[in-house]
Amino acid sequence: MKKSRLRLIAPIAVVTALALTGCSTSNLGGSSPDDPAGDSGPIKIGAVLDVTGAGASLGVPEQNTLNMLAKQLKADGGIDGRDVELTVLDNQSTEDGAAKATSKLIESEKVDIIIGASRTGPSLAMRPLAEAAKIPMISVAANVAIVEGSEWVFKTTQNDVIVIERMLDDAQAKGYTEVALVRDATGFGEGVAEYITELGADRGITLVTTESFEPSATDFTPQMTNVRSSDADAVIIWGINPSAALAQKAFVQLGVNKPVYQSHGIANQSFFDTAGDAANGVIAPMGRLLVADQLADDNAQRDVISQFQADYSAAYGEQPNAFAGHAFDAWHIAVNAIEAVGTDASDLREELETAQWTGVSGVFQMTAENHSGLTASALILAEAQDGRWNLLEG
């Protein structure tokens, strides 16, 4: 099912992205023999992030993280004596903006590697441009369609499929047999209902109703009224903040009164700031960053997470969220690959396919067949209570 869905998404994304930018594949190109930077000038890392708009709660901490790490790398002398220049462009949380920004990074900035985007839709708009230009790209978004079947595109956020598996395993253990879905109507929510249906069948769980909402939505009355009247034993809300948090408030205010799961798209403080007490009891699969103080001393990720939290807090006066962690991992995987093989695009791509990295989002083992590099072991289950996440399963 996944491959057949990608075969539909990818061609549409190619046509859409190229149409939006006015580009054809013939005028896209990154490093080339006549590139004046060659292999001795500055190394150029470009990033396309949702700094403003609906995805800003993801893009701002990601931008902060990349700026912090670029500053640290500069202080350490760059890579093999070469300066590293970071260019971050804001896609304004749109597919159009992401495609245009990617085109600019490739054609004008002539970057060696691209990080981004923050969300699935913009990342899917970037993918065909990176593939056509043969420039390595590391997305920090979730949907597996971003990397499935890709040659030049990688990602650091845990795949939506393993998040759903973790939810359904818990639902099965608790004896739930019917679930309802309320999902983001953008690319982040695309395919979620199909995955629940397919993976649920293996666990004796049926998806009984699906509702959707736009990321800009503020009124969730129709969706929650329908979910309330359904036969579902539990509800899955799938989105990012602020809409996912507003949906959670409506879920409680309208008395749905069923167990509720949310996705890893809410793994930041803004969920608690917006949802308030309505967040209590929510169960969500996520990486280990937000429960780092509850991890065992011998956990492989504990030290890298603790150092990242200390550095980010010192730089910005606040704790990083999970999305900052995805950018942290993308930066280090990119820099490690450049340190190993330089900036030749083909060499970089091949190196990324063998990347191993113990990071904030999990323990990565990239392969030619797996450009995400994470398994379900990258996720824990946490329960929200009184403005913090409590570890349920590590």
Image (cartoon, grey):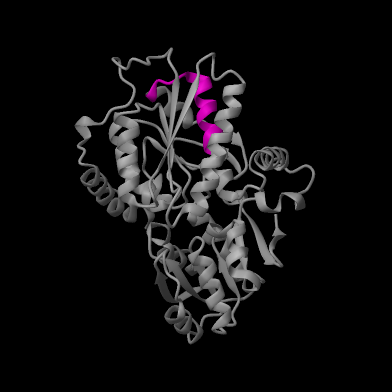
Where is 106 relative to 182, above or below?
A: above
Residue located 40% across and 26% down the image: 112
Tell me if I can see residue 334 in this picture: yes
Nearer to the camera, 271 or 301: 271
Taking the image as shown, residue 340 lies to the left or right of residue 272, namely left
Residue at image coords 62%, 58%: 269
Residue 85 in the figure: left or right of residue 264:
left
Against 357, is 161 above or below? below
Query: Observer-nearest residue: 202 or 164?
Result: 164
Q: Quadrant of residue 328?
A: top right
In the rendered image, the quadrant that contains the C terminus is: bottom right
- Residue 237 pos. (x, y %): 51, 69
State the residue lying farthest toward the bottom. Answer: 229
Q: Which residues are magenta?
A: 330-345
How many numbered circles are shown? 0
- Decide: is 377 above or below 168: above
How far across and how far down the image is residue 356, in percent?
57, 33
Note whether residue 370 is visible: no
Q: Residue at x 48, y 36 (%)?
A: 367
Q: Report the side of 325 relative to 314 (left or right).
A: left
The secondary structure making up most of the magenta span is helix
Q: Quadrant of residue 44?
A: top left
Q: Residue 33 location in percent, x, y?
A: 30, 15
- Tell me the quadrant of the picture where the N terminus can be found: bottom left
